[in-house]
Image: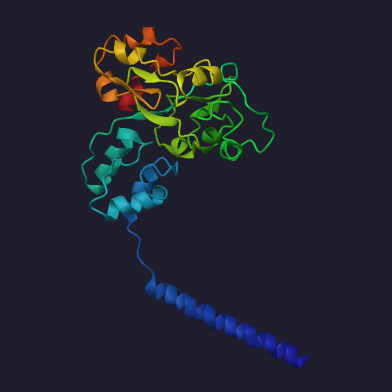
Amino acid sequence: MNTAIDIILVLVGVGAFFGLVLALADKKFAMEVNPLINEVEEVLPKGQCGACGFAGCAKYAEAVVENDEVPPNLCVPGKAAVAAKVAELTGKKAEAAEPKYAHLKCRGTKTAAAMAANYQGVPDCAAAKLIQGGPKGCKFGCIGFGNCVRACPFGALSMGEDGLPIVDKDICTGCGKCVSTCPQAILTLQTFDAPVQVECSSHDKGPAARKLCKNACIGCGLCMRSCTHGAIKLENNLAVVDQSICKTCDDPTCLAKCPTKAIEAMTGVKKTQQTA
């Protein structure tokens, strides 16, 4: 009995000794945190989206305060307002950044896209893609299980009744979290001044693309030939719009020429997003 008590007392003593050593070491080697870092972090939106290129808001706050080469306008969700506050706190100059929003390049709705299989697995786009590229016949389109919706830290995406995600442009910050999450790479960051966009990502040849989706781009080239500014070209059976040229066009004739309406005007974008 006495032996057991002695062992317990020894263990308690050893624990207390090492605890004291660790406490003294922590005090001796503790690093003072610049209070400005906390001030900068407080003005950030706390989305932890990583669009700034750092692992969360705290890391960006630390970098922008302690590194002269890190600009104050990297917080995409915060836009110009947050950039101005960070610039004021750090004494840096905030350059203007062009606002963007997430845009889905697919119109493969439940009624338009042909199904190749009845998927009964985990409702996850990445998981479904592992099984023959997903249940839809078109292997380039939206799989429709909402990985992007779940990934959005700001609640800007929701699944529509047609099986495709809907982006609320009034809420979307353009952080790009959904873009990096989509296994199909069909979500892109779109500028607010782009007048038209191809709503398809299929690289199948015309007849095959149309068979798999009624709304697919069939690579006919009519939009390209009708464009008076040379803003459209065909790349691997898909029409691609050069937005740097297209945004100067006041009369997009390509819209009337597309037989499947795969190219559409970008509407419903509020100007308030551009200056927020």
Residue 73, image quadrant: top left
Q: Position of residue 191 (x, y in %)?
A: 33, 26
Query: Quadrant where the C terminus lies?
Result: top left
- At x 45%, y 41%, the residue is 47
Q: x and y percent of residue 220 in the render? A: 39, 15
Pick whichever, 27 or 53, lies toward us. Answer: 53
Can you say whether 2 is above or below 28 in the image?
A: below
Can residue 15 be seen in this snapshot? yes
Front-most of residues 102 and 3:
102
77 on left or right of 251? right
> The N terminus is located in which quarter?
bottom right
In percent of width and height, residue 183 lies at: 50, 37
In terms of depth relative to the viewer, which is nearer, 131 or 95?
Answer: 131
Outermost top residue: 256
Question: Is 14 above or below relative to 91?
Answer: below
Q: Residue at x 56, y 32 (%)?
A: 146
* Residue 158 falls left or right of residue 244: right
Residue at point 37%, 10% (across, down): 255
Q: Residue at x 27, y 34 (%)?
A: 97
The location of residue 215, given as percent across then percent down, is 50, 16
Residue that extends furthest to the right in the rendered view of this protein: 1
Q: Work out whether 66 lies above or below 255.
A: below
